[in-house]
Amino acid sequence: MKAMVLAAGFGTRLQPLTRVLPKPMFPVLGRPLLSHIFDLLLSANISEVAVNIHHLPDSIIDYFEKEKPTDLNLHFSREEKILGTAGGIKKMEDFLGDGPFILINSDIVTDIALNKVIDFHKKNNSKLTLVVRQDISPEQFDSIEICEDGRIVHFIGASSMGLPENTKQVMFTGIQIMEPEIFNRIPEGQFCGTTEDIFPQMIRDDVPVYGYLYNGYWKDMGNRESYLQVNADALDEKVFLKGTSPNDTNHSFTIPPILVGRNCRIAENSKIGPHSVIGPNCTIKNGAIVENSILWEGVTIGAGSTVKGSVIAKNRTIGDGKNIKDESII
């Protein structure tokens, strides 16, 4: 099975950080978010992967040309203008159209077993399977309803005939399996959405569309707060991300869990943590405090400065005696 990762968006809720780095390249425990998505696909033996790109595309291509993922064949699809989810996969029909494929958002963190989703899709002879979950605040999301057997009977403005009484309200996670017949529903060369345009009509046409109910770890990394939370959860090992683990440190200036990258210079009378990720080549000077924050590569925190609940972009210097709280700084 092949896969496509959706990575063309602007990440507006994470501005100003996304002005200098596209969201799929945000470091999560020191590795790009996109690398963790690739790990997830490889765990299901998926090695042929397309990625659509638009916003700051060269930063994505350049990184993965230098850091080629082992056992993964990457195919980048540049979109000169945003085509939407459906338009983006239509552009890759020649690559994806020879069988069922996985489509996944690039801004989610999860440790779902994709093989189980694939088995569910095949068992139900589904034409479209969405990974869904029950959220504690479903009113924040567009309504999707599934039957006891997983059949989706209501989807954002479209319902099957004769809705059953016993349904569950769920939300879409941005992970799905599609059959190649979907390409017949997508217009060529124009903006088109899946959830807005394609999926509702499939429900109206009574096509077998199913929801795989997943209750494990999942988070949409859409804003600074959720970005910080994803890293904190990974440090707390609430989600397992390959190749990363908190530092086993016992220094007087650290409060675990933390992760400190290579070649960092940290003054003994500073304080790091808890829930802080320090990128490589950072400098933290005398009396500085970094708490519940993420420093990208090459950041300098001046003497006596405090950084809490914040993200500091690559190579930025915070001067002496500054107080940074709940900010994103580029």
Image: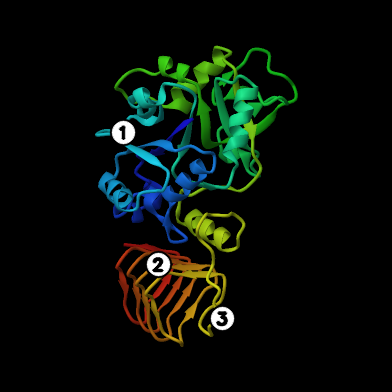
Q: Taking 24 as reference, is 299 above or below it? A: below
- Residue assigned mark 1: 82
Instruction: Check residue 279 in the rendering and tell me which mark sits there, or answer none.
Output: 2
Q: Amino acid at mark 2?
A: Gly
Give the class, few, some or many, for how many residues have Cα within 10 Å of label 1's Cα (few <14, many ≥20). Answer: some
Q: CA distance from mark 3 to mark 2?
A: 19 Å
Spot occupied by residue 25 in the image (x, y as percentages of width and height): 37, 51
* Circle nearer the N terminus (1, 3): 1
Disc count in the image?
A: 3
Give the class, few, some or many, for how many residues have Cα within 10 Å of label 2's Cα (few <14, many ≥20). Answer: many
Q: CA distance from mark 1 to mark 3?
A: 48 Å
Give the class, few, some or many, for how many residues have Cα within 10 Å of label 3's Cα (few <14, many ≥20). Answer: few
Q: Secondary structure at mark 3?
A: loop
Q: Which residue is at a point 57% across and 38% down the rendered structure image?
A: 114
* Circle nearer the N terminus (2, 1): 1
Instruction: Check residue 281 in the rendering and tell me which mark sits there, or answer none.
Output: none
Q: How is the image coloured?
A: rainbow
Spot occupied by residue 101 in the image (x, y as percentages of width and height): 48, 28
Q: Taking 225 as reference, is 206 above or below it? A: above
Q: Nearer the viewer, mark 2 or mark 1?
A: 2
Q: Which residue is at a point 74% across and 22% down the rendered structure image?
A: 165
Q: Secondary structure at mark 1?
A: loop
Please name whichever residue, 43 or 55, is drawn nearer the observer in this view of the structure: 43
Q: Amino acid at mark 1?
A: Ile
Q: Secondary structure at mark 2?
A: loop
Q: Which residue is at a point 45% across and 64% down the rendered structure image?
A: 326
- Residue assigned mark 3: 250
Quarter-of-image position of residue 240: bottom right
Q: Which residue is at a point 54% across and 26% down the rendered structure image?
A: 156
Q: CA distance from mark 2 to mark 1?
A: 32 Å
Q: Taking 31 as reference, is 316 above or below it? A: below
Please name whichever residue, 146 or 262, is drawn nearer the observer in this view of the structure: 262
